C-alpha cells in the first residue's frame, strides 16, 4: 500500500442545501436542493472543515418561510417514508466520538482507557496507542511500545508509516496491534472529522467513551447517563457544572475533566438510515430485514457536504 493511502470507499460528494439537514418526506426521492460534485474528500493531512464548535438548536425546528423541517442530531430516530419504503434515520454528532487525530502524549490515557473498556488487554492497548502516535508524528523516533518504518517494512506486504494525520478511520487497521476484530469493535466510536481535539460531546458519547475520561468512573457515568435519560440533553455550561456537582465532581476534579468534554456539536454528523420494509418488499429485503446505510456529512457555509458513505 502506498504511503498515506486511505482504505475508505471513494464516493462522490453530495451537497445538501439549507441550514441543518433538511430531509424530504414526500413519496418521491428528493431532487431539489441536491447536487452531486466530483470533488475529492479533504487532502492528506488536511483537517476537513476545521473551526470552532457551534451550538446548534436544541429542538427540531421548522422554517416557516420554506416549509422545510430541519433535523438536528439526536439520540432518537426520525421516521420517514420515501416512496413505499419506511425508514428510521439517526443523526449523531461526531463530537460524541474519540478523534484519532486528537490523541497526543498528554491525553493518550483516554484512548488506552477506551480500548480497555472495549475488552482489549491493557498491554495491547498501550502498543496500539503508541503506534498511533508514531503513525501521525513526522519524526522517526519510536514511542516505547510504538512502531515506525522498520516495523512495517518487515510485514509480508510492507508499507511505510504515514507521518501525517488520519484521513479515514479505516487507516487505523494499518496500525501495529490493530486486528480486524479490534477495528470492528471500535469503529463506531472513533472519528477523523472535526477540530482534531479530544473534546467529547457528553450528550452523544457512549458509556465506554465517557468512562475513558480520567476522573469519570463507570459508576459516575451511570449516574450521568441516568440524568440525561430522565431530563434530556444537557443544554448549557451552568447545567453541566450543576450535574457534575450533583454526582460529586466539584472543584479541581471538575476542572481536570472539563477540557475533555463539551455540550457543543461539531460541524460533522453521522447520518444512519435503516429501512423497515415496504408495502412490496423485495426478496433481498425479506431475507435481510431491510437495508442500512451510513454517511458522514460536514457543514460549511450553511450546507452539508457528504465525505463518506458506508453500506452497512
Image (cartoon, rainbow, N blue to C red):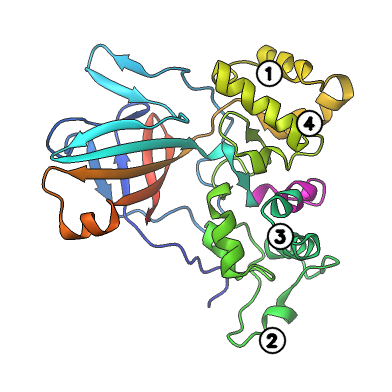
- Distance from disc 3 to disc 1, alpha carbons, whole Å, reads 31 Å
Q: Nearer the viewer, residue 91 or 32?
A: 91
Q: Residue furthest right?
A: 252
Count neighbours of disc 3 (C-alpha within 10 A) and say few if under 14, some if 14 to 19, many if 20 or more: some
Q: Which mark is residue 120?
A: 3
Q: Nearer the viewer, mark 2 or mark 1?
A: 1
Circle 1 sits on which residue? Answer: 240
Residue 177 is a magenta residue: no
Position above or below: 99 against 239? below
Sequence order check: which comes first, mark 3 or mark 1?
3
Sequence order check: which comes first, mark 3 or mark 4?
3
Asked where in the image residue 81 lies, by quadrant, the reply is: top left
Sequence order check: which comes first, mark 2 or mark 1?
2
Position above or below: 157 against 103? below
- Residue 273: horizontal and vertical position, in percent? 34, 43
As helix, strand or loop, the secondary structure at mark 2 comes to: loop
Q: Which residues are magenta?
A: 101-112
Asked if one can make out residue 271 in the rendered structure from this viewpoint, the answer is yes
Circle 4 sits on which residue? Answer: 257
Residue shown at 46% from the left, 29% from the top: 74
- Distance from disc 2 to disc 1, alpha carbons, whole Å, reads 49 Å
Sequence order check: which comes first, mark 3 or mark 2?
3
As helix, strand or loop, the secondary structure at mark 3 comes to: loop
Q: Nearer the viewer, residue 170 or 196?
A: 170
Count neighbours of disc 1 (C-alpha within 10 A) and say few if under 14, some if 14 to 19, many if 20 or more: some
| Residues under numbered marks 3 and 2 in contact, where contact means CB atoms less than 8 Å apart | no
Q: Nearer the viewer, residue 242 or 255?
A: 242
Sequence order check: which comes first, mark 4 or mark 1?
1
Q: Is residue 310 left or right of residue 214?
A: left
Amino acid at each position: 500500500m502506498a504511503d498515506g493511502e486511505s482504505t475508505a470507499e471513494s464516493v462522490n460528494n453530495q451537497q445538501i442545501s439549507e441550514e441543518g439537514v433538511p430531509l424530504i418526506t414526500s413519496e418521491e426521492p428528493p431532487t431539489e436542493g441536491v447536487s452531486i460534485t466530483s470533488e475529492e474528500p479533504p487532502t492528506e493531512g488536511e483537517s476537513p472543515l476545521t473551526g470552532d464548535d457551534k451550538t446548534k438548536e436544541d429542538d427540531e425546528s421548522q422554517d416557516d418561510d420554506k416549509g422545510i423541517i430541519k433535523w438536528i442530531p439526536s439520540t432518537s430516530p426520525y421516521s420517514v417514508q420515501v416512496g413505499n419504503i419506511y425508514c428510521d434515520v439517526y443523526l449523531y454528532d461526531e463530537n460524541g466520538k474519540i478523534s484519532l487525530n486528537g490523541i497526543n502524549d498528554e491525553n493518550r490515557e483516554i484512548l488506552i482507557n477506551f480500548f480497555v473498556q472495549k475488552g482489549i488487554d491493557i498491554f495491547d492497548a498501550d502498543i496500539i496507542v503508541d503506534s498511533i502516535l508514531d503513525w501521525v508524528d513526522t519524526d522517526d523516533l519510536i514511542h516505547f511500545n510504538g512502531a515506525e518504518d522498520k516495523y512495517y517494512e518487515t510485514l509480508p506486504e510492507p508499507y511505510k508509516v504515514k507521518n501525517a494525520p488520519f484521513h479515514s478511520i479505516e487507516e487505523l487497521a494499518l496500525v501495529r496491534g490493530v486486528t480486524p476484530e479490534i477495528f470492528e469493535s471500535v469503529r463506531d466510536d472513533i472519528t477523523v472529522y472535526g477540530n482534531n481535539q479530544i473534546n467529547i460531546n457528553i450528550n452523544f458519547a457512549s458509556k465506554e467513551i465517557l468512562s475513558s475520561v480520567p476522573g469519570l468512573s463507570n459508576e459516575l457515568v451511570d449516574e450521568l447517563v441516568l440524568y440525561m435519560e430522565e431530563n434530556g440533553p444537557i443544554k448549557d455550561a451552568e447545567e453541566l457544572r450543576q450535574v457534575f456537582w450533583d454526582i460529586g465532581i466539584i472543584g479541581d476534579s471538575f476542572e481536570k475533566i472539563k477540557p475533555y468534554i463539551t455540550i457543543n456539536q461539531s460541524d460533522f454528523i453521522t447520518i444512519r438510515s435503516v429501512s423497515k420494509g415496504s408495502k412490496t418488499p423485495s426478496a433481498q429485503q425479506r431475507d435481510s430485514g431491510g437495508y442500512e446505510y451510513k454517511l458522514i456529512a460536514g457543514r460549511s457555509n450553511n450546507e452539508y457536504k457528504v465525505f463518506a458513505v458506508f453500506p452497512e
